[in-house]
């Protein structure tokens, strides 16, 4: 239907969507949604749509022509986002095909309240009481929640149980002296009172004399915590925990989704969310404005305390590929003289961090790159926000002190002071648990869906009662003939620039050797399965960057004397037709040539246009 235009809502994570909010101000307008799955395996989820008023809604899956489960929940705008919705309508998407989408229709039935207040602090079938705890089961696992504080206490799944608690705290940022705030490095030159006045290699003149911060034992007394450096005020500082006295707890429960919202302080809010059929506990947090007292900076952390006996050994991902073993206070290739037992054991987390023992495993997946560690037995801590009040003298020449009012100009046009209040940030972590030494397995199982959530596209038009009449020529689609194995990710699927029948394809094996009995083995992929409306004519393997043939590159490689001594873990299988093999954690790149679209010449013009639009998504 040319009268409906599908759009994305970039601020959906803060419950803002102009289309859905404007369409639910009153009766008479239906919302149409296409949920797109960018993964090469089918999946389902429970998604939320911002709506404006408390009313009764119905959600229809247009592929199955059936009403789906939904629930309306009020939303607490703890981040103070302007024009965000007061309510969120959650619904179950059902299965969405690989590299494909399904369409839905949302209609407001009557402009009467949905009686959502009756779900608060309820005690129905999914929410049971056990002394002072609430027990919530989502069909995959059970969690125990403290009734009075909303704190997570325990998770159990498949005869494995784990004590767990989520705490919030902060480290005090190191600063050299109180009057160091907003002081940049001293001007470089013969007049400098620091070091020799010579520029350290890699630094430019206006950054000043970096010698006192970079060289020698004397540098330790000068290095501030800032934009590039994390350093607590005391090298072995224990984090200061946010007062666990809860200001407010709200519990909303339904068979579809349960939310426990906890206000710990004026600047820390946590929502614990459990969705039906999903294997994780979602922790949504809102932090800020981080209190700023004079020159005191704060490095805010989330701390997950569990009963896992990991002995200060933990694992972090390397750019979402291999997991690297970390051990507090130890380096595998040299003897470490440890001066910074906190900061020196923090590592980047791009996708996941986990700890494990012989009985259970705990993994935390993050939605953005952060720093983290396991400094104490059974504990995972992740830094979620920073607000420092001193420059770390690494080139920025200002503290890491973001505010909502911006800042004045730099001298000589201003005093480069920050304006307004500290910023407020929101984010999510996913908690997953498994059996003994299954940390990598449980983390891998949800890393791809966490990295690539369902994409929602919104449109609206005047409402109607007949669910069969839709604005779409197709109510669902899939751009692949057959979904790929669940341990394979389709990293790249795009047309080659300037060509109408060539595609750039990258396939990645998502498990390393030994992480899973089934998924860590070599896997065969039929490239022809990636093209639902084409036939593969030929394909050639390329290097990872696709700028040269793989065979040509291999032929030009320099062979070291001990080349024959290095045996691969798996022998590469020869390709059989369009079938290729991926070894654990291997990424392979191909240029695939296909035939033109399989559209019968007698097809209607509308059918041709519809299929062309679907093919364009490839």
Image (tube, rainbow, N blue to C red):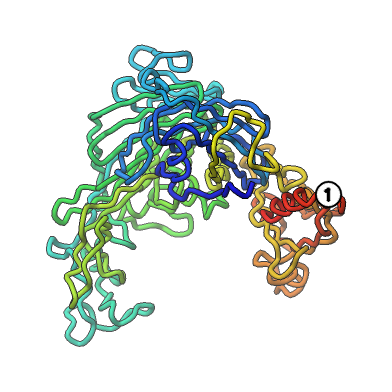
Question: Where 315 sits versus 307, above or below?
Answer: below
Q: Is residue 512 visible?
A: no
Residue 491, percent from left and from top: 64, 54
Instruction: For the C terminus, give its image quadrant.
Output: bottom right
Q: Is residue 120 left or right of residue 268?
A: right
Left or right: where does residue 534 sit relative to residue 304?
A: right
Q: Quadrant of residue 59?
A: top right
Q: Is residue 160 above or below residue 419?
A: above
In the rendered image, is residue 102 in sight? yes
Quick one: which residue is furthest to the bottom in this view?
Answer: 190
The residue lying toward the viewer, choosing from 566 and 400, is 400
As helix, strand or loop, the secondary structure at mark 1 comes to loop
Q: Which residue is mark 1?
A: 603
**Vertical placement of 294 versus 255: above or below?**
below
User: Percent x, y for residue 587?
Assistant: 67, 56
Q: Quadrant of the rendered structure where residue 395 is?
A: bottom left
Taking depth in this image into account, of 74 and 590 the one nearest to the observer is 74
Could you classify mark 1 by the number of other residues whose Cα lies within 10 Å: few (under 14), some (14-19), or many (20 or more)? few
Q: Nearer the viewer, residue 462 or 211?
A: 462
Q: Nearer the viewer, residue 568 or 547?
A: 547
Q: Is residue 445 above or below residue 435?
A: below
Residue 589: percent from left, percent from top? 70, 61
Taking the image as shown, residue 374 lies to the left or right of residue 510, namely: left
Residue at screen point 44% across, 46% down: 18
Residue at point 54% right, 33% down? 106
Q: How many labels were placed on the picture?
A: 1
Q: Please state the horizontal and vertical placement of residue 383, each as a whole percent of the image.
A: 35, 48
Residue at position x 57%, y 49% from top?
5
């Amino acid at each position: 239907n040319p009268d409906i235009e599908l759009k994305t809502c970039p601020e959906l994570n803060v419950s803002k969507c102009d289309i859905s909010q404007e369409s639910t101000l009153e009766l008479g307008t239906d919302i149409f949604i296409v949920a797109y799955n960018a993964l090469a395996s089918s999946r389902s989820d429970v998604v939320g749509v911002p709506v404006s008023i408390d009313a009764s809604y119905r959600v229809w899956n247009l592929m199955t022509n059936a009403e789906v489960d939904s629930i309306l929940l009020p939303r607490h705008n703890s981040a103070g986002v302007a024009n965000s919705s007061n309510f969120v309508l959650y619904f179950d998407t059902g299965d969405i095909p690989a590299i494909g989408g399904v369409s839905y229709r949302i209609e407001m039935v009557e402009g009467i309240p949905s009686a959502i207040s009756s779900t608060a602090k309820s005690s129905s079938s999914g929410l049971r009481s056990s002394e002072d705890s609430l027990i919530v089961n989502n069909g995959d696992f059970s969690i125990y929640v403290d009734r009075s504080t909303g704190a997570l206490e325990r998770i159990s799944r498949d005869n494995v149980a784990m004590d767990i608690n989520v705490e919030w705290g902060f480290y005090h940022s190191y600063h050299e002296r109180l009057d160091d705030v907003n002081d940049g490095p001293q001007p470089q030159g013969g007049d400098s009172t620091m070091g020799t006045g010579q520029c350290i290699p890699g630094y430019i003149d206006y950054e000043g004399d970096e010698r006192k911060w970079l060289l020698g034992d004397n540098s330790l007394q000068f290095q501030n915590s800032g934009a590039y450096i994390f350093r607590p005020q005391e090298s072995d500082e224990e984090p200061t925990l946010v007062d666990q006295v809860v200001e407010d707890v709200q519990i909303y429960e339904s068979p579809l989704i349960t939310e426990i919202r906890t206000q710990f302080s004026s600047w820390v809010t946590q929502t614990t969310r459990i969705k039906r059929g999903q294997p994780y506990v979602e922790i949504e947090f809102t932090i800020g404005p981080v209190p700023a007292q004079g020159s005191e900076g704060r490095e805010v952390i989330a701390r997950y305390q569990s009963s896992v006996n990991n002995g200060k050994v933990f694992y972090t991902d390397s750019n979402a590929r291999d997991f690297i073993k970390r051990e507090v206070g130890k380096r595998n290739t040299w003897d470490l003289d440890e001066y910074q037992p906190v900061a020196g054991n923090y590592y980047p987390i791009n996708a996941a961090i986990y700890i494990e023992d012989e009985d259970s495993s705990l993994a935390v997946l993050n939605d953005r790159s952060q720093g983290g560690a396991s400094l104490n037995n059974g504990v995972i801590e992740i830094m979620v926000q920073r607000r420092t009040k001193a420059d770390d003298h690494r080139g920025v020449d200002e503290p890491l002190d973001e505010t909502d009012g911006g800042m004045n100009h730099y001298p000589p046009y201003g005093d480069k002071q920050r304006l307004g209040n500290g910023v407020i940030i929101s984010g999510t972590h996913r908690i997953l648990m498994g059996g003994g030494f299954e940390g990598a397995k449980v983390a891998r199982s949800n890393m791809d869906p966490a990295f690539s959530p369902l994409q929602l596209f919104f449109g609206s038009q005047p409402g109607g009662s007949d669910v069969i009449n839709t604005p779409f020529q197709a109510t669902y689609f899939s751009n692949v003939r057959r979904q790929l194995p669940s341990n394979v990710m389709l990293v790249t699927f795009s047309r080659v620039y300037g060509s109408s029948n060539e595609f750039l394809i990258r396939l990645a094996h998502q498990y390393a050797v030994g992480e899973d009995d089934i998924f860590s083995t070599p896997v065969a992929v039929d490239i022809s399965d990636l093209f639902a409306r084409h036939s593969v004519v030929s394909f050639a393997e390329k290097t990872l960057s696709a700028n040269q043939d793989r065979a040509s590159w291999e032929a030009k490689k320099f062979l070291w004397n001990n080349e024959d001594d290095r045996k691969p873990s798996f022998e590469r299988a020869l390709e059989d037709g369009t079938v290729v093999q991926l070894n654990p954690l291997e990424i392979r790149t191909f240029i695939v040539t296909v035939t033109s679209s399989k559209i019968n010449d007698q097809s209607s013009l509308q059918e041709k246009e519809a299929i062309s639009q679907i093919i364009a998504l490839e």
